[in-house]
C-alpha cells in the first residue's frame, strides 16, 4: 500500500525541452524590453541635442555706449519678418506726448523725414486700443517690437521707433501703469506743448468747425500741404466764449503740469512748438536725444493760421478785454517768426 501511495504522490519529471523553451522565451522578453529602453534613451538624447542647436543664435555685439544708456538700447525681433542685415542695429523707443493742435502733426512729419526714425501717428485715437491697460500694453508691445505697420514705418533699419500720444487718450487716466511700462521697456518721452494757449484754442475751434463743414471740397483736413488750402481754412474766424476763456486756459495749463509731474521719472525732453519754429536747431537737440545721426529735417505741411491774432478771431475786442490784466495777457501780443 505504501508503494502505491508513493506511486501516486511522486511529481512527474518535466521535459528538458519544455524548460529550455521557457528560459528562451523569458530571455527574449527581457532582451526586447532592455532594447526598447536603450532606444528611447538614445532617441531622447539625439532630440535634445538637435533642439539645443536650433535655439543657438549669434548674439549681437555689445554697443559702444555708456552704462546709463544701456536700458534704452533694444534689438527687436519682429514676428512677421526678419530685420535681415539690420538685426544687430540698436533701436530706441520713444513717444511724443502732446495735446491736439499743438504742432505735433507737423513735428512728426519732421521726424519721419529722418532716414532712421519711424513715428507711426496717433495710435490711440482709436478708442478700443485705449479701452484698458491690457489693450494699451498690447498695442505698445506691437509698436516697439516693430510689428506695427504704417506709411511711416522703416522697419528693418529703424534706429528710433515711436508714435504720437495725446494726453486725453488714456495717457493721464492710466499714467501710473504707463510710467512703469516706460521705465521697464526703456521708452523715452518727448513732450511737445504750445506756449501761446490762445493760438492753440483758435486752432482747436477752427478744426472742429471744419470737421463738420468740410471746407475743402467736402473733405476734412487737419493738416494741409498747399498755401491755397491753408488760405481757405484760415478764412473761418471762430467766436470764442469770453466767459469760459480763462477757465479753459487754466485747465490746459493744469493738465500740462500734471503730465510733466506724472512722467518726471522717465527719460524725457520738453519742447515747445514756438521754440522749434523760431529756432530749428531745436531739432538737433531731438536727434541727439534719440541718438540718431543729425540730418536737416523738412516738412511739407503748410501753416494755416498766420499773422496777428486780431485777424483770426471774430470777437477780438471781447477776448482782449477778458485777458488784459490777467496772467494770460501776454498771449494777446506774443508772436513768433522763424529765425
Image (spheres, grey):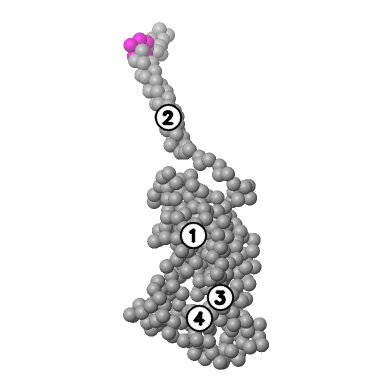
In three-dimensional space, the C-alpha distance between marks 2 and 3, rounded to whole angstroms, equals 72 Å
CB within 8 Å, label 2 to label 1: no
Q: Nearer the viewer, mark 4 or mark 2?
A: 4
Residue corresponding to mark 3? 336
- Asked if 248 appears above or below 56 in the picture, the reply is below
Residue corresponding to mark 2? 46
Which label is found at residue 296?
Answer: 1
Q: Residue at the far top: name it.
A: 3
Which quadrant of the figure has residue 270?
bottom right
Q: Residue at the far front: name it.
A: 339
Give the residues drawn in magenta, as a range: 13-19
Q: Earlier in the sequence, mark 4 or mark 2?
A: 2
Q: Earlier in the sequence, mark 4 or mark 3?
A: 4
In three-dimensional space, the C-alpha distance between marks 4 and 1, rounded to whole angstroms, equals 26 Å
Residue drawn at x 55%, y 53% as measured from the top left? 291
Residue drawn at x 56%, y 81% as measured from the top left? 198
Q: Residues within 10 Å of mark 2 (few under 14, many from 20)?
A: few
In three-dimensional space, the C-alpha distance between marks 1 and 3, rounded to whole angstroms, equals 21 Å
Residue drawn at x 55%, y 60% as measured from the top left? 284
Amino acid at each position: 500500500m505504501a508503494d502505491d501511495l508513493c506511486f501516486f504522490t511522486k511529481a512527474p519529471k518535466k521535459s528538458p525541452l519544455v524548460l529550455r523553451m521557457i528560459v528562451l522565451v523569458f530571455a527574449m522578453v527581457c532582451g526586447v524590453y532592455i532594447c526598447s529602453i536603450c532606444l528611447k534613451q538614445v532617441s531622447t538624447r539625439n532630440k535634445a541635442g538637435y533642439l539645443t542647436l536650433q535655439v543657438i543664435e549669434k548674439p549681437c555685439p555689445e554697443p559702444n555706449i555708456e552704462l546709463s544708456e544701456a536700458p534704452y538700447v533694444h534689438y527687436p525681433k519682429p514676428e512677421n519678418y526678419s530685420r535681415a542685415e539690420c538685426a544687430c542695429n540698436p533701436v530706441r523707443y520713444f513717444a511724443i506726448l502732446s495735446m491736439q493742435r499743438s504742432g505735433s502733426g507737423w513735428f512728426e512729419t519732421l521726424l519721419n523725414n529722418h532716414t532712421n526714425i519711424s513715428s507711426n501717428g496717433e495710435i490711440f485715437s482709436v478708442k478700443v486700443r485705449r479701452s484698458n491697460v491690457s489693450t494699451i500694453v498690447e498695442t505698445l508691445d506691437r509698436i516697439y517690437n516693430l510689428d506695427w505697420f504704417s506709411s511711416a514705418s522703416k522697419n528693418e533699419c529703424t534706429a528710433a521707433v515711436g508714435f504720437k500720444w495725446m494726453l486725453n487718450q488714456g495717457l493721464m487716466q492710466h499714467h501710473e501703469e504707463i510710467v512703469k511700462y516706460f521705465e521697464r521697456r526703456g521708452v523715452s518721452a518727448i513732450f511737445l506743448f504750445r506756449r501761446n494757449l490762445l493760438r492753440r484754442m483758435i486752432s482747436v475751434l477752427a478744426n472742429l468747425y471744419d470737421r463738420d463743414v468740410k471746407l475743402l471740397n467736402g473733405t476734412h483736413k487737419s493738416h494741409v500741404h498747399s498755401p491755397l488750402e491753408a488760405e481757405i481754412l484760415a478764412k473761418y474766424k471762430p467766436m470764442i466764449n469770453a466767459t469760459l476763456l480763462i477757465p479753459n486756459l487754466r485747465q490746459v495749463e493744469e493738465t500740462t503740469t500734471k503730465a510733466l509731474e506724472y512722467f518726471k521719472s522717465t527719460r524725457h525732453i520738453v519742447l515747445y512748438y514756438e521754440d522749434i519754429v523760431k529756432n530749428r536747431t531745436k531739432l538737433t537737440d531731438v536727434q541727439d536725444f534719440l541718438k540718431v545721426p543729425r540730418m536737416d529735417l523738412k516738412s511739407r505741411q503748410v501753416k494755416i493760421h498766420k499773422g496777428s491774432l486780431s485777424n483770426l478771431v471774430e470777437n477780438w475786442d471781447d477776448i482782449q478785454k477778458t485777458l488784459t490784466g490777467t496772467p494770460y495777457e501776454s498771449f494777446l501780443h506774443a508772436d513768433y517768426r522763424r529765425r
